[in-house]
Image (cartoon, rainbow, N blue to C red):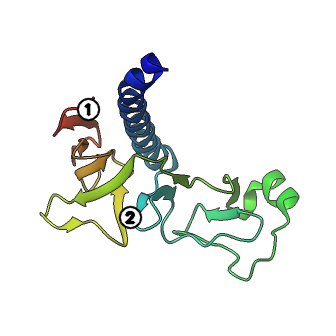
């Protein structure tokens, strides 16, 4: 029993550090995915972070989703969508390209909730504006650029790690601001 009691604090510290590292890695992968989607789709993509709910997700701004999570993107205009929730006839659209429409199926949810003890702490934009409550957004553009900024994640105590987003390339790098045990 004494050995278990002595080893438990070390185990918990290691576990908590691994959770924060894992969540940091997953967020960096999501950032890379948002950049990739913006380039491939040739449409801006948004990474939204909800600090109250401790969650983040990717979405295409200015596009209305239907109940079936189908979106109709027009090749000749910015965007067309069925806002009333009706489902378009996909067989006609996918077989006949003369309608200038493509049906794109998106996942029902790209939302990720942070695993405790990891948490979203803040987003500091390149303009110096710091958001630590509510919802913040980083936009990724079709040319590979983004709004840029620093996303800070935290764990228990003062352990934090920051993800720096380069505004020209949208590439991320880690800026450890405290030791991760």
Label drawn at residue 180: 1
Give yes or no for contact between labels 2 and 1 (Cβ–Cβ under 8 Å).
no
Residue at the limit of the structure toward the top, as seen here: 3
Camera-side residue of 34 and 20: 20
Q: Residues within 10 Å of mark 2 (few under 14, many from 20)?
A: some
| In-image side of 99 versus 27 (left or right) | right
Q: Residues within 10 Å of mark 1 (few under 14, many from 20)?
A: some
Spot occupied by residue 137 in the image (x, y as percentages of width and height): 36, 63
Q: Earlier in the sequence, mark 2 or mark 1?
A: 2
The label shown at residue 57 is none
Relative image position of residue 177 (x, y in whole percent)? 16, 40
- The residue furthest bottom is 84
Residue 89: percent from the left, percent from the top? 85, 65
Position of the C terminus by quadrant: top left
Q: Which mark is residue 51?
A: 2
Q: CA distance from mark 2 to mark 1?
A: 21 Å
In what element is the residue under mark 2?
A: loop
| Front of the two marks 2 and 1 | 1
Which element carries disc 1, helix, strand or loop?
A: loop
Q: Number of callouts in the render?
A: 2
Q: For the point 42% across and 27% down, which residue is it?
A: 8
Question: Which is nearer the eye, 165 or 121?
Answer: 121
Q: Is residue 3 above or below residue 111?
A: above
Question: Going 67% across and 63% down the picture, which residue do you hit?
Answer: 71
Nearest to the observer: residue 34 or residue 177: 177
Q: Residue at x 27, y 51 (%)?
A: 151
Report the residue at 27% width, 59% height from top.
Answer: 122
The answer, for residue 30, to whether it is visible in the render is yes
45, above or below 65, in the image = above
């Amino acid at each position: 029993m004494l050995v278990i009691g002595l080893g438990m604090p070390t185990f918990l510290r290691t576990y908590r550090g691994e959770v924060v590292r894992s969540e940091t890695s997953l967020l960096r992968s999501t950032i890379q995915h948002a950049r990739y989607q913006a380039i491939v789709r040739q449409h801006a993509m948004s990474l939204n972070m909800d600090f109250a709910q401790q969650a983040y997700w990717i979405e295409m701004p200015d596009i209305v989703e239907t109940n079936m999570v189908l979106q109709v993107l027009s090749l000749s205009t910015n965007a067309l969508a069925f806002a009333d929730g009706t489902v378009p006839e996909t067989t006609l659209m996918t077989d006949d390209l003369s309608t200038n429409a493509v049906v794109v199926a998106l996942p029902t949810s790209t939302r990720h909730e942070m695993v405790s003890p990891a948490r979203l702490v803040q987003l500091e934009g390149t303009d110096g504006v710091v958001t630590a409550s509510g919802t913040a957004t980083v936009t990724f553009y079709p040319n590979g650029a983004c709004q840029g900024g620093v996303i800070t994640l935290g764990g228990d105590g003062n352990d934090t790690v920051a993800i720096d987003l380069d505004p020209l390339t949208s590439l991320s790098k880690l800026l450890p601001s405290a030791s991760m045990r």
